[in-house]
Amino acid sequence: MRHDTPAQCGVPEARRVVCLVSRSNASAALEQFLASHPQNPWRASLWLDIGLADRTSGRFSAVIHAFEQARATVQASRDLALRPIAVRALSEQLTLETRLGHEQSVTQLLHAAQHLGMSAQDSLAMSLAENGLWDMQQHPESAFQCGWIALRALWQTQGFHVNTAPSLPMDAAHPGYSLGQLVTMAAQMHQPVVAVHLAANATIPVPSVVHWKSGHFATIVAEDHGHYQVADPTLEGGLARMTAAAVHDESSGYFLVPAANGELAMSERPVNAHEATTVRGAGYTTSNNPHGFPSGCNQSCTGSNGSSGGVNGAGGGTGGATPGAVSAPSPSPSTGMPTYSISPMLVSLSLTDTPLSYAPPKASHTTGRVTGLARTAVDMAPAPTSTTQAPIN
């Protein structure tokens, strides 16, 4: 690869763009920068950053594209020093595709991981994906519960808590529940919902169950100044703050709204029974988080990921309300000695240390945080250690 000078690489512009992205989480600026600087030596890293930013904002299709671009850039460069970027991008894509329940994509990515020479020593995501693929193939009736979890999260916003298993059996030949089946199960629980299809740029119903183009269900639980809080176990941490544009871009247009909200239900096109059978969600909901504890979650929280945590205690397989862990004390801030977190659910030990911290007279307080995760995997291999810079608001 040709190495340009800092001026040719657009270093001043890159710094401005990275600052903009860190404040607004808008990856479009980075993509424009890469289009203007096709020979930038940081191209692979920036595509990886774009994917991570898009994942936070719930843009699933953009996430997959960004991770694929990062891997393709590394492959084209043939620079062995860039291999960790390809490993990270493949690991993140594996995790996302597994949670989305995309069996074919997971199979292809596992083959790519073997070609890259990856193993559990490189990425716990690989071993979790292998377990997830087996679970999806052998136990589809329990693996694809995103629709039921989304319904439970919807009811929780209305103060109705359900800890029972779904009332309808799942057809193994067609994994996941259809929109029509969710309507039926809601009626059986005496919490009726109405299936509607939103027109482009229509007002997004809150609360509601949304069907994503990627093939699974999630729950829109709140709205705040044009941003929507979405509960989705597919996302890192189980929650996302999405713009209206992102919701419209990623949704298939199909929503479930509480029947009690009659005005909203009547304002959009109703979905007939036959059409409702064709809309199916098969997100994989029994996977663990390869990065350990979700951001902002300590050992005593109900958890946002995994087979028993669920989103705010509302979902996660059929175990929903089971706390993520209760046997260890809550971690203290890591600005002194390193702190630890133990999760029986994840079978993991997480260590956190903040050796560097700077509070300028102006701007955000910035820390240099080091985290390490040791998890009991198939081959008992620890996860790689990562270093992050996290502004404190």
Image (spheres, rainbow, N blue to C red):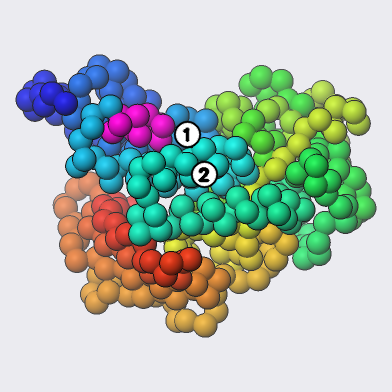
Sequence-first tag of 1 and 2:
1
Residue at x 86% of width, y 52% of height: 169
Q: Is residue 218 visible?
A: no
Q: Which residues, given as a range, are shown in magenta?
A: 66-75
Q: Residues within 10 Å of mark 1 (few under 14, many from 20)?
A: many
Q: Circle 1 sits in a helix, a strand or a loop, which is it? A: helix
Question: Is the C-beta separation of discs 1 and 2 under 8 Å?
Answer: yes
Relative to 391, is 82 above or below? above
Q: Is residue 67 magenta?
A: yes
Residue at x 91% of width, y 31% of height: 273
Q: Is residue 334 visible?
A: yes
> Which residue is under mark 1?
64
Q: Main secondary structure of the magenta part?
A: helix
Residue 49 falls left or right of residue 161: left
Residue 47 falls left or right of residue 345: left
> Which residue is under mark 2?
96
Q: Is residue 180 magenta?
A: no
Relative to 120, is 73 above or below? above
**Image quadrant assignment for residue 277:** top right
Tell me the distance, in whole angstroms, between the alpha carbons under discs 1 and 2: 8 Å
Residue 316 position in % (x across, y down):
65, 59
Residue 88 position in % (x across, y down):
35, 46
Relative to 382, is 93 above or below? above
Q: Nearer the viewer, residue 136 or 178?
A: 136
